[in-house]
Image (cartoon, helix red, strand yellow):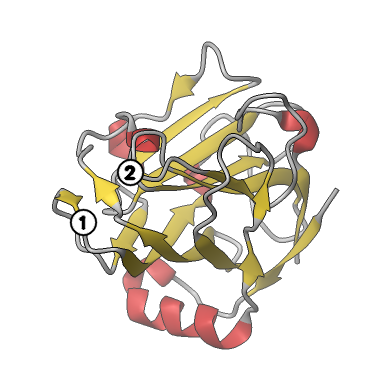
Amino acid sequence: MAKLIVKKLAIENPNANVAEAAALLEAKTEKVKIETVNWKDYPYQPEISFKIGHNNDSILLKFYVTEKNPKAVETKVNGDVYKDSCVEFFLSPKADGSYYNFEFNCIGTPHVGYGPGRHDRQPVPEELLAGVTAISTLGSSPIDLNEGDKTWEMLLIIPKDTMLHDEVATLSGLEAKGNFYKCGDETAEMHFVTWNAVGTENPDYHQYPFFGDIVFE
């Protein structure tokens, strides 16, 4: 299993100054690649990596993507963003089998749920997701591009309070489990790429046994 150390960044309140948070993330953290293609029926592999850090109260996460013909038509919070060009971060704060699935299409529409597996997941309320920052270089309006390779980035700031089913007093010292993904279930080039390998017969990201270790400084 892969292991990731999430660096602690010295910023008091990233939601108050997104530009400062983004600059600190760029300067103080290293890129991690998402490059595992687990299923031979879906060989297309976009170029994707991420940087991640935290400041006790929020997770700072930035994705870097180059892919063919990105698409984003879902604008409803907790809608079917996985059908679009989508980046995902699954996190089990207590490493207890239950986890949050943070999913964002390439224009920043969020879908976040909680539970122990794929079925019967509990959506995180829209009013709580309003506190999550999602900024994409592709903007926030629906797109369905046919321009070949396109490079885009997305900055996410996820307050710990978003994880309402866990009592996370501080992110510092948290020993969690999780995985990072790129997908596009209804894009021109359907794809399923992961950070930590997933050993299932068919694409399935809701697989806690294949989560890697994520340790917050």
Q: CA distance from mark 2 to mark 1?
A: 9 Å
Pointer 1 local density, CA inside 10 Å: few below 14, some 14–19, many at least 20: few
Q: Is residue 48 above or below residue 176?
A: below
**Helix, strand or loop at disc 1?**
loop
The residue under the point 64% across, 65% down is: 33
- Is residue 85 or residue 188 the one in the foreground? 188
Q: Which mark is residue 188?
A: 2
The residue singled out by tag 1 in the image is: 146
The residue under the point 27% across, 48% down is: 71
Left or right of residue 70, residue 75 in this image: left
The residue under the point 28% across, 36% down is: 127
If you read the primary sequence from the N terminus, does the residue marked by circle 2 or circle 1 appear first?
A: 1
The residue under the point 41% across, 34% down is: 185
Residue extending furthest toward the top: 120
Q: Which mark is residue 130?
A: none
Q: Pointer 2 and pointer 1: residues touching (CB < 8 Å)?
A: yes
Left or right of residue 3, residue 26 in this image: left
Q: Is residue 158 above or below residue 95?
A: below
Residue 207 location, quadrant: top right
Left or right of residue 170, residue 95 in this image: right
Judge whether residue 122 can be spotted in this image.
yes
- Is residue 167 or residue 151 the one in the foreground? 151
Question: What residue type is disc 2 on?
Answer: Ala
Question: Where residue 171 appears, x then y in whole percent?
Answer: 66, 56
- Is residue 98 or residue 136 the one in the foreground? 136
Judge whether residue 60 can be spotted in this image.
no
Quadrant in which the C terminus is drawn: bottom right
Residue extending furthest toward the left: 141
Question: Where residue 216 appears, x then y in whole percent?
Answer: 73, 60
Question: What residue type is disc 1 on?
Answer: Asn
Q: Is residue 76 above or below residue 47?
A: above
**Helix, strand or loop at disc 2?**
loop
